[in-house]
Protein backbone atom coordinates (compact mmCIF):
# COMPACT_ATOMS: atom_id res chain seq x y z
CA UNK A 1 0.00 0.00 0.00
CA UNK A 2 1.24 3.49 -0.83
CA UNK A 3 0.46 6.13 1.78
CA UNK A 4 0.83 9.92 1.76
CA UNK A 5 3.03 11.36 -0.92
CA UNK A 6 5.86 11.98 1.53
CA UNK A 7 6.30 8.21 1.64
CA UNK A 8 5.78 7.72 -2.08
CA UNK A 9 8.48 8.12 -4.68
CA UNK A 10 7.53 10.57 -7.42
CA UNK A 11 7.77 9.16 -10.91
CA UNK A 12 9.91 11.07 -13.36
CA UNK A 13 8.19 12.83 -16.24
CA UNK A 14 11.13 12.22 -18.51
CA UNK A 15 10.43 8.49 -18.69
CA UNK A 16 6.99 9.09 -20.13
CA UNK A 17 7.33 12.35 -22.02
CA UNK A 18 5.69 15.67 -21.21
CA UNK A 19 2.54 16.39 -23.24
CA UNK A 20 1.85 19.98 -24.13
CA UNK A 21 -1.26 21.58 -22.65
CA UNK A 22 -3.04 21.45 -25.97
CA UNK A 23 -2.33 17.72 -26.31
CA UNK A 24 -3.63 17.15 -22.79
CA UNK A 25 -6.82 19.04 -23.62
CA UNK A 26 -7.30 17.06 -26.83
CA UNK A 27 -6.73 13.84 -24.92
CA UNK A 28 -9.42 14.68 -22.39
CA UNK A 29 -11.81 15.67 -25.19
CA UNK A 30 -11.16 12.28 -26.76
CA UNK A 31 -12.06 10.56 -23.49
CA UNK A 32 -15.28 12.60 -23.26
CA UNK A 33 -16.19 11.77 -26.85
CA UNK A 34 -15.61 8.04 -26.44
CA UNK A 35 -17.71 7.92 -23.30
CA UNK A 36 -20.48 10.41 -24.08
CA UNK A 37 -20.55 10.60 -27.89
CA UNK A 38 -21.24 7.90 -30.50
CA UNK A 39 -24.98 7.70 -29.86
CA UNK A 40 -26.39 4.17 -29.93
CA UNK A 41 -23.04 2.42 -29.44
CA UNK A 42 -22.67 -0.36 -28.47
CA UNK A 43 -25.70 -2.50 -29.35
CA UNK A 44 -27.79 -3.50 -26.32
CA UNK A 45 -27.03 -6.83 -24.65
CA UNK A 46 -29.18 -9.07 -22.47
CA UNK A 47 -27.69 -7.92 -19.14
CA UNK A 48 -28.80 -4.36 -19.90
CA UNK A 49 -32.34 -5.63 -19.60
CA UNK A 50 -31.91 -7.80 -16.52
CA UNK A 51 -30.64 -5.50 -13.79
CA UNK A 52 -31.99 -2.12 -15.03
CA UNK A 53 -35.36 -3.76 -15.77
CA UNK A 54 -35.48 -4.94 -12.16
CA UNK A 55 -34.85 -1.34 -11.03
CA UNK A 56 -37.60 -0.15 -13.39
CA UNK A 57 -40.11 -2.56 -11.86
CA UNK A 58 -39.17 -1.38 -8.38
CA UNK A 59 -39.44 2.30 -9.31
CA UNK A 60 -42.69 2.07 -11.31
CA UNK A 61 -44.53 -0.76 -9.55
CA UNK A 62 -42.81 -1.11 -6.17
CA UNK A 63 -41.98 -4.70 -7.12
CA UNK A 64 -38.93 -6.25 -5.50
CA UNK A 65 -37.60 -8.89 -7.86
CA UNK A 66 -35.02 -11.51 -6.77
CA UNK A 67 -32.34 -9.27 -8.32
CA UNK A 68 -33.26 -6.55 -5.82
CA UNK A 69 -32.12 -8.75 -2.93
CA UNK A 70 -28.83 -9.62 -4.64
CA UNK A 71 -27.80 -6.00 -5.41
CA UNK A 72 -29.96 -3.58 -3.39
CA UNK A 73 -27.38 -0.79 -3.53
CA UNK A 74 -27.48 -0.77 -7.32
CA UNK A 75 -31.27 -0.47 -7.22
CA UNK A 76 -31.12 2.43 -4.78
CA UNK A 77 -28.53 4.30 -6.84
CA UNK A 78 -30.07 3.81 -10.29
CA UNK A 79 -33.52 4.61 -8.92
CA UNK A 80 -32.47 8.25 -8.50
CA UNK A 81 -31.99 9.06 -12.22
CA UNK A 82 -34.89 6.75 -13.09
CA UNK A 83 -37.25 8.78 -10.89
CA UNK A 84 -35.86 12.07 -12.20
CA UNK A 85 -35.64 11.34 -15.93
CA UNK A 86 -37.56 8.12 -16.55
CA UNK A 87 -36.71 4.39 -16.33
CA UNK A 88 -35.27 3.90 -19.81
CA UNK A 89 -32.18 2.29 -21.27
CA UNK A 90 -30.94 5.68 -22.46
CA UNK A 91 -31.07 7.12 -18.93
CA UNK A 92 -29.36 4.03 -17.49
CA UNK A 93 -26.59 4.22 -20.11
CA UNK A 94 -26.00 7.93 -19.59
CA UNK A 95 -25.83 7.33 -15.85
CA UNK A 96 -23.19 4.64 -16.38
CA UNK A 97 -21.15 7.00 -18.57
CA UNK A 98 -21.28 9.79 -15.98
CA UNK A 99 -20.32 7.38 -13.21
CA UNK A 100 -17.46 6.20 -15.45
CA UNK A 101 -16.14 9.75 -15.73
CA UNK A 102 -16.38 9.99 -11.96
CA UNK A 103 -14.23 6.94 -11.39
CA UNK A 104 -11.69 8.25 -13.91
CA UNK A 105 -11.36 11.36 -11.73
CA UNK A 106 -10.90 9.14 -8.67
CA UNK A 107 -8.31 7.13 -10.57
CA UNK A 108 -6.32 10.29 -11.32
CA UNK A 109 -6.44 11.29 -7.65
CA UNK A 110 -5.23 7.84 -6.58
CA UNK A 111 -2.40 7.96 -9.10
CA UNK A 112 -1.26 11.31 -7.73
CA UNK A 113 -1.61 10.06 -4.17
CA UNK A 114 0.53 7.05 -5.06
CA UNK A 115 3.47 9.12 -6.27
CA UNK A 116 2.69 9.70 -9.95
CA UNK A 117 3.59 13.14 -11.24
CA UNK A 118 1.02 15.01 -13.34
CA UNK A 119 2.34 13.62 -16.61
CA UNK A 120 2.23 10.00 -15.47
CA UNK A 121 -1.22 10.48 -13.91
CA UNK A 122 -2.44 12.04 -17.16
CA UNK A 123 -1.22 9.04 -19.14
CA UNK A 124 -2.83 6.69 -16.63
CA UNK A 125 -6.19 8.38 -17.20
CA UNK A 126 -5.71 8.35 -20.96
CA UNK A 127 -4.87 4.65 -21.02
CA UNK A 128 -7.84 3.78 -18.84
CA UNK A 129 -10.19 6.29 -20.42
CA UNK A 130 -9.64 5.05 -23.98
CA UNK A 131 -9.37 1.32 -23.28
CA UNK A 132 -11.74 -0.75 -25.38
CA UNK A 133 -12.89 -2.83 -22.45
CA UNK A 134 -13.50 0.16 -20.17
CA UNK A 135 -15.35 2.32 -22.70
CA UNK A 136 -17.43 -0.60 -23.92
CA UNK A 137 -18.53 -1.26 -20.35
CA UNK A 138 -19.15 2.32 -19.22
CA UNK A 139 -21.42 2.96 -22.19
CA UNK A 140 -23.70 0.08 -21.15
CA UNK A 141 -26.38 -0.03 -18.47
CA UNK A 142 -24.53 -2.46 -16.22
CA UNK A 143 -23.56 -2.60 -12.55
CA UNK A 144 -19.80 -2.60 -13.06
CA UNK A 145 -19.37 1.20 -13.47
CA UNK A 146 -20.97 1.65 -10.02
CA UNK A 147 -18.85 -1.19 -8.66
CA UNK A 148 -15.57 0.28 -9.94
CA UNK A 149 -16.49 3.73 -8.61
CA UNK A 150 -17.05 2.18 -5.17
CA UNK A 151 -13.79 0.23 -5.34
CA UNK A 152 -11.75 3.29 -6.28
CA UNK A 153 -13.50 5.40 -3.61
CA UNK A 154 -12.59 2.77 -1.02
CA UNK A 155 -8.95 2.75 -2.16
CA UNK A 156 -8.81 6.56 -2.15
CA UNK A 157 -9.90 6.83 1.49
CA UNK A 158 -7.78 3.83 2.47
CA UNK A 159 -4.64 5.55 1.17
CA UNK A 160 -5.36 8.73 3.12
CA UNK A 161 -4.34 9.35 6.75
CA UNK A 162 -6.33 7.31 9.26
CA UNK A 163 -8.38 10.20 10.61
CA UNK A 164 -11.84 9.68 12.07
CA UNK A 165 -13.50 11.08 8.94
CA UNK A 166 -11.51 8.85 6.60
CA UNK A 167 -12.15 5.77 8.74
CA UNK A 168 -15.90 6.44 8.63
CA UNK A 169 -15.63 6.88 4.86
CA UNK A 170 -13.80 3.53 4.59
CA UNK A 171 -16.61 1.80 6.46
CA UNK A 172 -19.32 3.49 4.37
CA UNK A 173 -17.54 2.73 1.08
CA UNK A 174 -17.13 -0.91 2.08
CA UNK A 175 -20.82 -1.23 2.95
CA UNK A 176 -21.99 0.52 -0.19
CA UNK A 177 -19.64 -1.49 -2.39
CA UNK A 178 -20.84 -4.86 -1.11
CA UNK A 179 -24.49 -3.84 -1.32
CA UNK A 180 -23.95 -2.71 -4.91
CA UNK A 181 -22.17 -5.86 -6.06
CA UNK A 182 -20.96 -8.55 -3.68
CA UNK A 183 -18.31 -9.79 -6.12
CA UNK A 184 -16.10 -6.92 -4.91
CA UNK A 185 -15.58 -8.86 -1.67
CA UNK A 186 -12.00 -9.63 -2.73
CA UNK A 187 -10.90 -5.99 -2.36
CA UNK A 188 -10.96 -5.54 1.47
CA UNK A 189 -8.71 -8.59 2.05
CA UNK A 190 -6.43 -7.38 -0.76
CA UNK A 191 -6.05 -4.01 0.98
CA UNK A 192 -5.20 -5.70 4.27
CA UNK A 193 -2.51 -7.92 2.74
CA UNK A 194 -1.13 -5.01 0.70
CA UNK A 195 -0.68 -2.85 3.80
CA UNK A 196 1.24 -5.68 5.48
CA UNK A 197 3.48 -6.30 2.46
CA UNK A 198 4.25 -2.67 1.58
CA UNK A 199 7.72 -1.34 2.43
CA UNK A 200 8.34 0.96 4.14
CA UNK A 201 5.29 0.20 6.27
CA UNK A 202 3.39 2.44 8.64
CA UNK A 203 2.80 2.27 12.41
CA UNK A 204 0.50 -0.52 13.55
CA UNK A 205 -2.12 1.75 15.17
CA UNK A 206 -3.43 3.49 12.01
CA UNK A 207 -3.18 0.24 10.08
CA UNK A 208 -5.26 -1.53 12.74
CA UNK A 209 -7.84 1.27 12.64
CA UNK A 210 -8.23 0.78 8.90
CA UNK A 211 -8.80 -2.94 9.41
CA UNK A 212 -11.49 -2.19 11.98
CA UNK A 213 -13.18 0.22 9.56
CA UNK A 214 -13.20 -2.44 6.84
CA UNK A 215 -14.65 -4.99 9.28
CA UNK A 216 -17.36 -2.57 10.39
CA UNK A 217 -18.30 -1.91 6.76
CA UNK A 218 -18.57 -5.63 6.04
CA UNK A 219 -20.62 -6.20 9.21
CA UNK A 220 -23.08 -3.42 8.31
CA UNK A 221 -23.49 -4.85 4.80
CA UNK A 222 -24.20 -8.30 6.30
CA UNK A 223 -26.74 -6.73 8.66
CA UNK A 224 -28.55 -5.06 5.75
CA UNK A 225 -28.65 -8.34 3.82
CA UNK A 226 -29.93 -10.01 6.96
CA UNK A 227 -32.74 -7.48 7.24
CA UNK A 228 -33.66 -8.02 3.59
CA UNK A 229 -33.77 -11.77 4.17
CA UNK A 230 -36.11 -11.37 7.12
CA UNK A 231 -38.38 -9.10 5.08
CA UNK A 232 -38.93 -11.73 2.36
CA UNK A 233 -37.04 -15.02 2.82
CA UNK A 234 -38.53 -16.70 -0.25
CA UNK A 235 -37.66 -13.99 -2.78
CA UNK A 236 -34.28 -13.42 -1.13
CA UNK A 237 -33.43 -17.10 -1.53
CA UNK A 238 -34.72 -17.17 -5.13
CA UNK A 239 -32.22 -14.42 -5.93
CA UNK A 240 -29.18 -15.72 -4.07
CA UNK A 241 -29.57 -19.46 -4.64
CA UNK A 242 -29.06 -19.33 -8.44
CA UNK A 243 -26.28 -16.76 -7.98
CA UNK A 244 -24.29 -19.02 -5.66
CA UNK A 245 -25.05 -22.39 -7.27
CA UNK A 246 -25.11 -21.53 -10.99
CA UNK A 247 -27.05 -24.72 -11.66
CA UNK A 248 -27.89 -23.61 -15.20
CA UNK A 249 -24.21 -23.22 -16.13
CA UNK A 250 -22.57 -26.19 -17.83
CA UNK A 251 -19.22 -27.10 -16.30
CA UNK A 252 -16.47 -29.14 -17.84
CA UNK A 253 -15.71 -32.59 -16.45
CA UNK A 254 -12.53 -31.14 -14.92
CA UNK A 255 -14.41 -28.80 -12.53
CA UNK A 256 -13.53 -29.20 -8.85
CA UNK A 257 -15.60 -27.17 -6.44
CA UNK A 258 -19.02 -26.44 -4.99
CA UNK A 259 -21.69 -24.30 -6.64
CA UNK A 260 -20.27 -21.15 -8.19
CA UNK A 261 -16.80 -21.49 -6.72
CA UNK A 262 -14.11 -23.95 -7.69
CA UNK A 263 -11.40 -24.56 -10.22
CA UNK A 264 -12.24 -25.37 -13.83
CA UNK A 265 -9.17 -25.42 -16.10
CA UNK A 266 -11.37 -24.92 -19.17
CA UNK A 267 -13.07 -21.83 -17.72
CA UNK A 268 -9.73 -20.51 -16.45
CA UNK A 269 -8.16 -20.89 -19.87
CA UNK A 270 -11.12 -19.18 -21.56
CA UNK A 271 -10.90 -16.34 -19.03
CA UNK A 272 -7.18 -15.91 -19.66
CA UNK A 273 -7.79 -15.96 -23.41
CA UNK A 274 -10.49 -13.28 -23.09
CA UNK A 275 -8.21 -11.08 -20.97
CA UNK A 276 -5.43 -11.21 -23.55
CA UNK A 277 -7.88 -10.58 -26.39
CA UNK A 278 -9.62 -7.58 -24.84
CA UNK A 279 -6.51 -5.68 -23.72
CA UNK A 280 -3.34 -7.46 -24.91
CA UNK A 281 -0.90 -4.61 -24.20
CA UNK A 282 -2.37 -3.74 -20.81
CA UNK A 283 -2.48 -7.39 -19.83
CA UNK A 284 1.22 -7.90 -20.62
CA UNK A 285 2.51 -4.67 -19.05
CA UNK A 286 0.08 -4.89 -16.12
CA UNK A 287 1.15 -8.43 -15.25
CA UNK A 288 4.81 -7.43 -15.42
CA UNK A 289 4.10 -4.38 -13.28
CA UNK A 290 2.30 -6.53 -10.71
CA UNK A 291 5.27 -8.88 -10.41
CA UNK A 292 7.70 -5.98 -10.07
CA UNK A 293 5.51 -4.34 -7.41
CA UNK A 294 5.18 -7.54 -5.38
CA UNK A 295 8.90 -8.32 -5.54
CA UNK A 296 9.92 -4.74 -4.74
CA UNK A 297 7.10 -4.38 -2.15
CA UNK A 298 6.01 -1.04 -3.61
CA UNK A 299 2.65 0.00 -5.11
CA UNK A 300 1.23 -3.10 -3.46
CA UNK A 301 -2.34 -1.78 -3.26
CA UNK A 302 -2.89 -2.08 -7.00
CA UNK A 303 -0.68 -5.17 -7.23
CA UNK A 304 -2.83 -7.09 -4.74
CA UNK A 305 -6.00 -5.66 -6.32
CA UNK A 306 -4.94 -7.31 -9.57
CA UNK A 307 -3.66 -10.51 -7.96
CA UNK A 308 -6.65 -11.05 -5.64
CA UNK A 309 -9.17 -10.02 -8.30
CA UNK A 310 -7.72 -12.35 -10.93
CA UNK A 311 -7.58 -15.22 -8.45
CA UNK A 312 -11.18 -14.58 -7.41
CA UNK A 313 -12.30 -14.68 -11.05
CA UNK A 314 -10.28 -17.77 -11.94
CA UNK A 315 -11.89 -19.67 -9.06
CA UNK A 316 -15.41 -19.30 -10.43
CA UNK A 317 -17.47 -21.49 -12.72
CA UNK A 318 -18.73 -18.52 -14.74
CA UNK A 319 -16.79 -15.45 -15.86
CA UNK A 320 -18.41 -12.99 -18.26
CA UNK A 321 -16.66 -10.27 -20.23
CA UNK A 322 -18.04 -7.53 -17.99
CA UNK A 323 -16.68 -9.28 -14.89
CA UNK A 324 -13.11 -8.82 -16.13
CA UNK A 325 -13.36 -5.04 -16.14
CA UNK A 326 -12.85 -4.92 -12.35
CA UNK A 327 -9.18 -5.70 -13.07
CA UNK A 328 -8.80 -2.81 -15.50
CA UNK A 329 -7.95 0.07 -13.09
CA UNK A 330 -5.19 -1.96 -11.44
CA UNK A 331 -3.88 -3.13 -14.82
CA UNK A 332 -3.73 0.41 -16.23
CA UNK A 333 -2.13 1.78 -13.06
CA UNK A 334 0.59 -0.90 -13.01
CA UNK A 335 1.24 -0.48 -16.74
CA UNK A 336 2.00 3.22 -16.38
CA UNK A 337 3.98 2.68 -13.19
CA UNK A 338 6.10 -0.04 -14.81
CA UNK A 339 6.93 2.14 -17.80
CA UNK A 340 7.93 5.04 -15.57
CA UNK A 341 10.25 2.68 -13.72
CA UNK A 342 11.91 1.35 -16.88
CA UNK A 343 13.93 4.42 -17.70
CA UNK A 344 15.83 3.50 -20.84
CA UNK A 345 18.17 6.47 -20.91
CA UNK A 346 17.72 6.78 -24.66
CA UNK A 347 17.01 10.12 -26.29
CA UNK A 348 13.47 11.27 -26.72
CA UNK A 349 11.78 12.00 -30.01
CA UNK A 350 9.11 14.52 -30.84
CA UNK A 351 8.27 17.94 -32.15
CA UNK A 352 8.80 21.11 -30.16
CA UNK A 353 7.78 20.72 -26.52
CA UNK A 354 6.06 17.40 -27.16
CA UNK A 355 8.68 14.76 -26.40
CA UNK A 356 8.35 10.98 -26.02
CA UNK A 357 10.71 8.29 -24.79
CA UNK A 358 10.00 4.67 -25.66
CA UNK A 359 7.75 4.19 -22.59
CA UNK A 360 5.65 7.13 -23.76
CA UNK A 361 5.43 5.63 -27.24
CA UNK A 362 4.14 2.39 -25.70
CA UNK A 363 1.40 4.29 -23.88
CA UNK A 364 0.57 6.31 -26.97
CA UNK A 365 0.26 3.06 -28.90
CA UNK A 366 -2.17 1.72 -26.27
CA UNK A 367 -4.32 4.87 -26.52
CA UNK A 368 -4.38 4.65 -30.32
CA UNK A 369 -5.16 0.93 -30.20
CA UNK A 370 -8.17 1.43 -27.93
CA UNK A 371 -9.47 4.40 -29.92
CA UNK A 372 -9.11 2.78 -33.34
CA UNK A 373 -10.69 -0.46 -32.14
CA UNK A 374 -13.67 1.37 -30.67
CA UNK A 375 -14.22 3.38 -33.85
CA UNK A 376 -13.88 0.24 -35.95
CA UNK A 377 -16.45 -1.67 -33.90
CA UNK A 378 -18.77 1.34 -34.03
CA UNK A 379 -18.54 1.42 -37.85
CA UNK A 380 -19.06 -2.30 -38.39
CA UNK A 381 -21.76 -3.30 -35.88
CA UNK A 382 -25.43 -2.46 -35.47
CA UNK A 383 -28.37 -3.34 -33.26
CA UNK A 384 -30.17 -6.31 -34.89
CA UNK A 385 -33.47 -5.39 -33.24
CA UNK A 386 -33.05 -1.61 -33.53
CA UNK A 387 -35.41 -1.09 -36.50
CA UNK A 388 -38.18 -3.14 -34.88
CA UNK A 389 -37.83 -1.23 -31.62
CA UNK A 390 -38.00 2.12 -33.44
CA UNK A 391 -41.09 1.01 -35.42
CA UNK A 392 -42.93 -0.17 -32.32
CA UNK A 393 -42.01 2.99 -30.43
CA UNK A 394 -43.78 5.11 -33.05
CA UNK A 395 -46.80 2.81 -33.44
CA UNK A 396 -47.55 1.96 -29.81
CA UNK A 397 -49.07 4.01 -27.00
CA UNK A 398 -47.79 4.37 -23.46
CA UNK A 399 -50.85 2.47 -22.23
CA UNK A 400 -50.24 -0.51 -24.54
CA UNK A 401 -48.91 -3.74 -23.05
CA UNK A 402 -45.78 -5.02 -24.81
CA UNK A 403 -44.26 -8.46 -24.31
CA UNK A 404 -40.57 -8.70 -25.18
CA UNK A 405 -37.12 -9.37 -23.80
CA UNK A 406 -36.18 -7.06 -20.90
CA UNK A 407 -33.43 -5.34 -22.91
CA UNK A 408 -36.10 -4.49 -25.55
CA UNK A 409 -38.62 -3.32 -22.96
CA UNK A 410 -36.04 -0.92 -21.49
CA UNK A 411 -36.08 0.93 -24.83
CA UNK A 412 -39.88 1.33 -24.97
CA UNK A 413 -42.28 3.60 -23.10
CA UNK A 414 -45.19 1.14 -23.21
CA UNK A 415 -46.17 -1.03 -20.24
CA UNK A 416 -43.73 -3.96 -20.04
CA UNK A 417 -44.27 -7.69 -19.76
CA UNK A 418 -41.07 -9.76 -19.86
CA UNK A 419 -41.24 -12.93 -21.95
CA UNK A 420 -40.19 -14.88 -18.84
CA UNK A 421 -43.87 -14.63 -17.86
CA UNK A 422 -44.46 -17.29 -20.51
CA UNK A 423 -43.31 -20.56 -18.98
CA UNK A 424 -40.77 -22.68 -20.91
CA UNK A 425 -40.51 -22.95 -23.87
CA UNK A 426 -41.29 -19.20 -23.49
CA UNK A 427 -43.98 -19.04 -26.17
CA UNK A 428 -47.19 -17.01 -25.77
CA UNK A 429 -50.11 -19.07 -24.49
CA UNK A 430 -53.70 -17.70 -24.80
CA UNK A 431 -54.20 -17.52 -21.03
CA UNK A 432 -51.04 -15.43 -20.69
CA UNK A 433 -51.53 -12.88 -23.45
CA UNK A 434 -55.29 -12.45 -22.98
CA UNK A 435 -55.18 -12.47 -19.21
CA UNK A 436 -54.70 -9.52 -16.90
CA UNK A 437 -53.11 -7.40 -18.20
CA UNK A 438 -53.92 -8.29 -21.81
CA UNK A 439 -50.89 -8.06 -24.12
CA UNK A 440 -51.24 -5.66 -27.07
CA UNK A 441 -47.92 -6.17 -28.89
CA UNK A 442 -45.19 -8.78 -28.99
CA UNK A 443 -41.65 -8.00 -30.14
CA UNK A 444 -39.82 -11.25 -30.68
CA UNK A 445 -36.07 -10.73 -31.04
CA UNK A 446 -33.90 -13.58 -32.29
CA UNK A 447 -31.04 -12.79 -29.92
CA UNK A 448 -32.38 -13.12 -26.35
CA UNK A 449 -35.98 -14.34 -26.58
CA UNK A 450 -35.18 -16.50 -29.59
CA UNK A 451 -32.17 -17.90 -27.75
CA UNK A 452 -34.30 -19.07 -24.83
CA UNK A 453 -36.80 -20.65 -27.22
CA UNK A 454 -34.06 -22.52 -29.06
CA UNK A 455 -32.56 -23.75 -25.80
CA UNK A 456 -35.98 -25.14 -24.93
CA UNK A 457 -35.81 -27.37 -28.01
CA UNK A 458 -38.39 -25.53 -30.13
CA UNK A 459 -37.63 -25.18 -33.84
CA UNK A 460 -38.16 -21.84 -35.67
CA UNK A 461 -41.04 -23.40 -37.62
CA UNK A 462 -42.79 -24.52 -34.43
CA UNK A 463 -42.31 -21.11 -32.84
CA UNK A 464 -43.71 -19.37 -35.93
CA UNK A 465 -46.78 -21.60 -35.80
CA UNK A 466 -47.47 -20.66 -32.18
CA UNK A 467 -47.17 -16.93 -32.91
CA UNK A 468 -49.36 -17.13 -36.01
CA UNK A 469 -52.13 -18.75 -33.95
CA UNK A 470 -52.54 -15.68 -31.73
CA UNK A 471 -50.93 -12.76 -33.51
CA UNK A 472 -50.48 -10.98 -36.81
CA UNK A 473 -46.99 -10.19 -38.05
CA UNK A 474 -46.88 -6.44 -38.76
CA UNK A 475 -43.15 -5.61 -39.02
CA UNK A 476 -40.31 -7.97 -39.85
CA UNK A 477 -36.54 -7.41 -39.83
CA UNK A 478 -33.67 -9.92 -39.95
CA UNK A 479 -33.19 -9.54 -36.19
CA UNK A 480 -36.74 -9.24 -34.84
CA UNK A 481 -40.45 -9.45 -35.61
CA UNK A 482 -43.28 -7.29 -34.28
CA UNK A 483 -46.65 -9.02 -33.73
CA UNK A 484 -50.04 -7.45 -33.05
CA UNK A 485 -52.09 -9.63 -30.72
CA UNK A 486 -55.57 -10.42 -31.98
CA UNK A 487 -58.49 -9.53 -29.73
Image: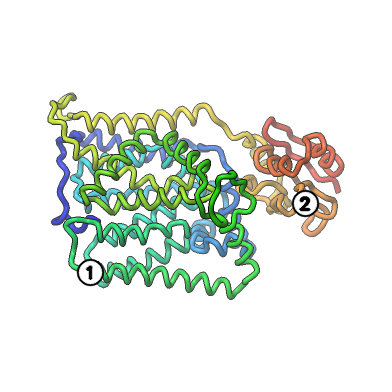
Q: Residue at x 87, y 42 (%)?
A: 469
Residue 196 in the image: above or below residue 393: below
x and y percentages locating residue 285 in the rendered image: 30, 37
- Disc 1 to disc 2, C-alpha distance: 61 Å
* Residue 481 location, quadrant: top right
What label sits on residue 300 in the rendered view? none
SS at circle 2: loop
The residue drawn where x is 34% and y is 60% is: 154
- Please say if 34 is above or below 183: above
Could you tell me if the residues under marks 1 and 2 are in contact, i.e. CB atoms within 8 Å? no
The residue carrying pointer 2 sits among few (fewer than 14), some (14 to 19) or many (20 or more) residues within 10 Å by Cα, namely: many
Q: Position of residue 107 (x, y in %)?
A: 31, 50
Q: In the rendered view, tell whether residue 227 sits above or below residue 97.
A: below
Q: Which mark is residue 206?
A: 1
Q: Is residue 13 left or right of residue 292?
A: left
Query: Is 257 left, or right, of 324 in this rendering?
Result: right
Disc 2 designates what residue? 439
Residue beneath the point at 19% across and 36% down:
342
Q: Nearer the viewer, residue 55 or 116?
A: 116
Q: Earlier in the sequence, mark 1 or mark 2?
A: 1
Q: Position of residue 404 (x, y in %)?
A: 69, 46
Q: Is residue 62 visible?
A: no
Colour mapping used in the image: rainbow
Q: Is residue 384 visible?
A: yes
Q: Is residue 448 left or right of residue 424?
A: left
Q: Secondary structure at mark 1?
A: helix
Amino acid sequence: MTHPSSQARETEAGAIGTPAVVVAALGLLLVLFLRLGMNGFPAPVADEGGWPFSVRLWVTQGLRTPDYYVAPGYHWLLAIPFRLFGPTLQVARLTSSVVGLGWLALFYAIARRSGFDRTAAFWAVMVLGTSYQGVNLDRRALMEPFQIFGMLALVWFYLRPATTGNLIAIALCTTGLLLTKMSAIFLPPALVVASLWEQPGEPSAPRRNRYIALAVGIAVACAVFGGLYLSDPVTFASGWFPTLTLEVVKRSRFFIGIGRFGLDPVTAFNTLQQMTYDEPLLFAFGLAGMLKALIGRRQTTMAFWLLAGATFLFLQALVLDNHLVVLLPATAFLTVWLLTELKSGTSTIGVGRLRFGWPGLCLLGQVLYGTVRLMGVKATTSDPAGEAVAWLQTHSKKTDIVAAAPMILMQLEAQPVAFFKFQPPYLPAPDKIHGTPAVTWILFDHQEWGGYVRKSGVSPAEAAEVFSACCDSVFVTPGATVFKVRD
